[in-house]
Amino acid sequence: MAASLPPGRRRRRPRRGSLERPVNGRLYRGAYLFTAVPLLLLAFTISSPAPLPTPALPETFDTGAALALARSLARDYPDRAPGTRGAGDRLPLSGAATWFEQALAPYGLTLSARSWTQEVPGRGRVQLTNIAGVVQGQSRAAILVTAHRDDLGTSPGADDDASGTAVLIELARSYAEPAGSKNAGRVLPAHTLIFLSTDGGSYGGLGTAHFLASSPERRNIVSAVNLDALAGPGPPALEIAGDRPRSPSPTLVATAAAEIAAQTGSEPAHVDLLGQLIDLGFPFTLYDQGQFLAAGIPAVTLTTGGDRPPAAFGDDVLQTRRLAEMGEAAQGLLGSLDQDVALAATTASDVWVGGRTIRGWAIELLLVALLIPFAAAVVDLYALCRRNRVAFAPALRALRSRLWFWLFAGAVFTCFRLLGAWPGGPALPPNPASALARRWPVLALLALLALLGAGWAVARRRLAVRRRVTAEEQLAGYLVALVALLLVALLAAASNPFALLFLLPALHTWLWLPQLRIARAPVRVALFLLGLAGPALVLASLAWRFGLGLDAPWYLLELVANGYVTTLPVAIALAATASACQLAAVSAGRYAPYPHASERGPRGPLRERVRGVVRATRSHRRALALRRGASEPYSAR
């Protein structure tokens, strides 16, 4: 600690490169030159993809027939939740399943129904059925048009998704008119067309997942169009997020946007630049195109529901004009895709901004380049500490203790999942309107918190402040945590570079915490909280974009529990949390390096018992080894 200065004497600014001012600002700013090339490359990748030509075919979409079909499905079978009589999934089929088959029967399509039994979250083990109508084309390459016919059972589901099912039937009719009709003698489509009515769409896209996992037609699909909530009051929109960091091909999105604009007179809505980056860094969507993109199939959803499907209550009114516009746009999109004989199944990670695209690889390169200033400053800080003989081992052991605690938290959460404390089901996002998204298992969460509290009580014995911490020890605590964050960032970049969006604000903000060690505690705490803006983007996206509100934290835990968020991102998040906790402790003045053996207090009875068992086991093994060695013949030895 510096000695107090006489009254009236100005305090000098610490010398650059000293332990009081350890971060090299000039090196940090100069390292930003490495981002110039990625920025230049990014600028050159901006393009305006051209849509496919509009097909020269007469418009045959019958809005009146589609409206009648949607109203009929919603009126006759208002409760189409899986496992109900209205869904009609049991063999022989009945209810909505039979209704769909009868609606397609007059058009001569090759129909096939595939039923399976599956655990549906909140409904138990029920039978589901997908029904597909196929129009054979000149090529085996297939274009898939899909809509789910089920609902949550809390409303007639006229918009979500009787409207999409009705448009699906009308599109099939326009391509499969029976002989003798006005379309007789027409040329076969260039591609095989599959019109798929899925089940379990309101429960995370269960039908789509089963189709992708088991259908033999899946390998021939070159493009997919999902129809969901086409007659709502919202503006026409495109959903392009995937369950993996992928997006549709620019040509597919440009064609879909052009068809909707031709019918409505305005460009369709889609998520903005920040939202697309969040969706690539934390892949998440509530529509079925996400599963196709994760499987490498370019897909897009046409909807009027926005990022979150429309609310169930009051879903009984259809907007006729909107249904006509979206139906005709879907027909035009299908025709444009079909006439492109070179249509290839390619996905990308591009971002849409104002009708232009930015290549995803250029954004990834820029995000990785933004790590360089932080890495350069951290390496320089490490060299400074080495020159001043700052000891790192106690800080490293303190971070190890925090990491073990958070890994313990992950292990306890996993055990609770195996014991059935969390909702089960497939690795798909639950519908935010379902009870599962809002029903917190309070007892299980309290038990989890109790176990974590007990674990922290054990770990805290080695992390509690026992004496005054020196400036060098504080600096070591900062440096070890910053190096750990750099390693976490590199691992995140290797798995999904877009995930750096959530880490970079923390890295570039928390880098300056060692520089503010002499500042007041509120300043350090405020800087630390500012670094949490990146991780907060995930919760903010779930809370506002998807309408989850205060249920967003529990919904995120649900995604982890059912496996939608895989193990690697969870492990990266736990390691980053451990590092952040060490930085928070130093910033708040509650940090202590791992104590030396002479500073540790007496062991508790449990630790002493475990230590005794371990020592006894080791002694027993040594004795056995000595006996075996003594019993061997001299010649053998």
Image: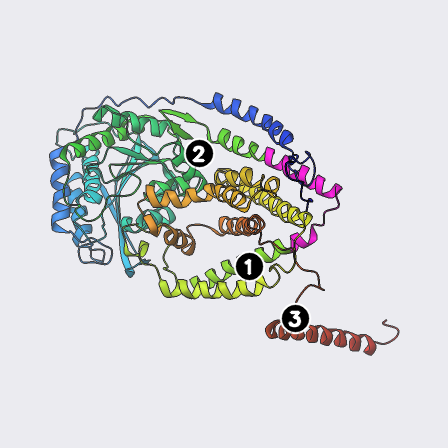
Q: Label 2 sits on what residue type?
A: Ser
Give the camera-side residue of 344 and 248.
Answer: 248
Residue sitting nearer the eye, 137 or 605? 605
Cα separation between marks 2 and 3: 56 Å
Residue 70 relative to residue 48: left or right: left
- Point out residue 507 in the picture as x, y percentages from the top left corner: 55, 40
Question: For residue 147: magenta?
Answer: no
Residue 617 screen position, x and y as percent? 68, 74
- Of labels 1 and 3, earlier in sequence is 1
Q: Give the alpha-carbon distance from disc 1 to disc 3, as whole Å.
A: 21 Å
**CA–CA distance between discs 1 and 2?**
36 Å
Q: Nearer the viewer, mark 1 or mark 3?
A: 3
Can you identify the residue that label 1 sits on?
405
- 10 Å crowding of disc 3: few (<14), some (14-19), many (20+): few
Pick whichever of labels 2 and 3 is earlier in the sequence. Answer: 2
Question: Which amino acid does the dot numbered 3 rest on?
Answer: Pro
Q: Looking at this view, is 553 or 623 the one in front?
A: 553
Q: Name the residue under label 3.
A: 602
Q: Main secondary structure of the magenta part?
A: helix
Helix, strand or loop at mark 2: loop
Q: Mark 2 points at which residue?
A: 349
Give the extent of the magenta segment.
Answer: 373-397
